[in-house]
Amino acid sequence: MAGSSFGTLVRLTTFGESHGKAIGGVLEGIPAGFVLDFDQIQNDLDRRKPGQSAIVTQRKESDQVQFLSGIFEGKTTGTPIGFLIENEDQKSKDYEELQKAYRPSHADFTYQQKYGIRDHRGGGRSSARETASRVVAGAIAKQILAQKNIRIDAFVDQIGSLKWTGEWNSGLKVVSESTLVRVPSLELAEQMEELIREIRKEGDTIGGRIRCVIEGVPVGLGEPVFDKLHAELGKAMLSINAVKGFEIGSGFDSISMRGSEHNDVFTTDGKTRTNYSGGIQGGISNGMPIDFRVAFKPVATIMREQETINENFESISISGKGRHDPCVVPRAVPIVEAMAALVVLDYFLIQNAYQ
């Protein structure tokens, strides 16, 4: 299988399946001599892990990361950082009926047709469990970026039709992280939690949106043709399970605007009065906050009977079993931050190589 690696100078390769013995990764390109805060890495894993609240999947995984290489006496050595996260709470019996059935809107059918074989237990490599490895790598990247005064904050700004419309500032991160849904409004959080609980009772699922703001990015990251910074961010976000859309700055709202409204006018300090560009112009960072949004579909596994087909293309019906998220969006916040951090650090080091 190709496609398990991401990045250029900072390059992450992940391995493992949802119901295998473990998952993990190899992270290359991290500079030597950097002191790691292992508690921060574990904190990001805890923000992503299952079983953290009543509105997410109740699979119980401690998600304790074990570092195998690339670190000595708490510092990076410049060599590949290998790490492992053991799987502890698989219930593979919940997936027995899926050995010959294709779940609607899952990767079951496409995997079988492409490879002629698939791991039906929890989706194998297509499971969102794989993203725990991304969070480990991203947490390391975030720590390095923080030393460069680059801050990455992601938060939920929509669940279903419930939207947050406030003005973001980094002080709101404390508010968003204090709620189960990671939205920067206590009042809206209650409404979102109630909606998710209602959806779960119905045996259904619902989608939402995550917004990410990256502050402190210097001017000059990214290339003007194929390696545009926002193109790489889009690729990173669209590689996350259940993501169906990516927009930066004004995004799709720009369609209804005129150029005279949309242009970001420069001020004498080199900044812009508005940020419809989302911090990137011509594929290159312009020094303004990078601001983008990521849309997540409703989780495909629902606890209702659905029509589908089996491996013989015969019509059958199935219903979801096991432990699944009624809404994946709150747990995806640290994943979005992690992938954003990997992209920005990669492009930062590429730009330093030029200089």
Image (cartoon, grey):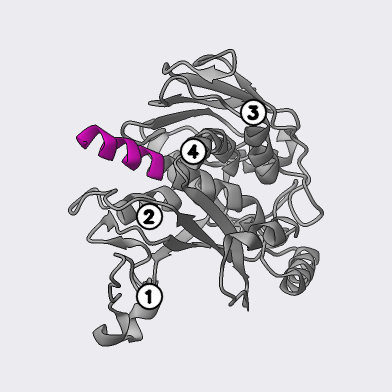
Which residue carries the number 2 mark? 234
Q: Name the amino acid, label 4.
A: Gln
**Stretch in magenta:** 344-355
Q: Earlier in the sequence, mark 3 or mark 1?
A: 3
Which residue carries the number 3 mark? 38
Which residue carries the number 1 mark? 274
Crowdedness of circle 4 by 10 Å Cα count: few (<14), some, many (20+)?
Answer: few
Mark 2, secondary structure of its residue: helix
Tell me where residue 230 sits by quadrant.
Answer: bottom left
Of badges 2 and 1, nearer the viewer stands: 1
Which residue carries the number 4 mark? 147
Q: Earlier in the sequence, mark 4 or mark 2?
A: 4
Crowdedness of circle 2 by 10 Å Cα count: few (<14), some, many (20+)?
Answer: some
Q: CA distance from mark 4 to mark 2?
A: 25 Å
Position of residue 32 measured from the top left corner of the image (x, y, whole percent): 43, 20
Q: Are marks 2 and 1 in contact (CB under 8 Å)?
A: no
Tell me where residue 307 sits by quadrant.
Answer: bottom right
Q: CA distance from mark 4 to mark 3?
A: 16 Å
168 is higher (above) or lower (below) than 4: below
The foreground one among 330 and 344 is 344
Q: Are marks 4 and 3 in contact (CB under 8 Å)?
A: no
Q: What's the magenta bit mostly, secondary-structure-wise?
A: helix
Position of residue 8 measured from the top left corner of the image (x, y, whole percent): 31, 34
Q: Earlier in the sequence, mark 4 or mark 3?
A: 3
Task: Indicate whether residue 168 is drawn in magenta.
Answer: no
**Is 309 left, or right, of 197 in this rendering?**
left
Q: Name the amino acid, label 2.
A: Gly
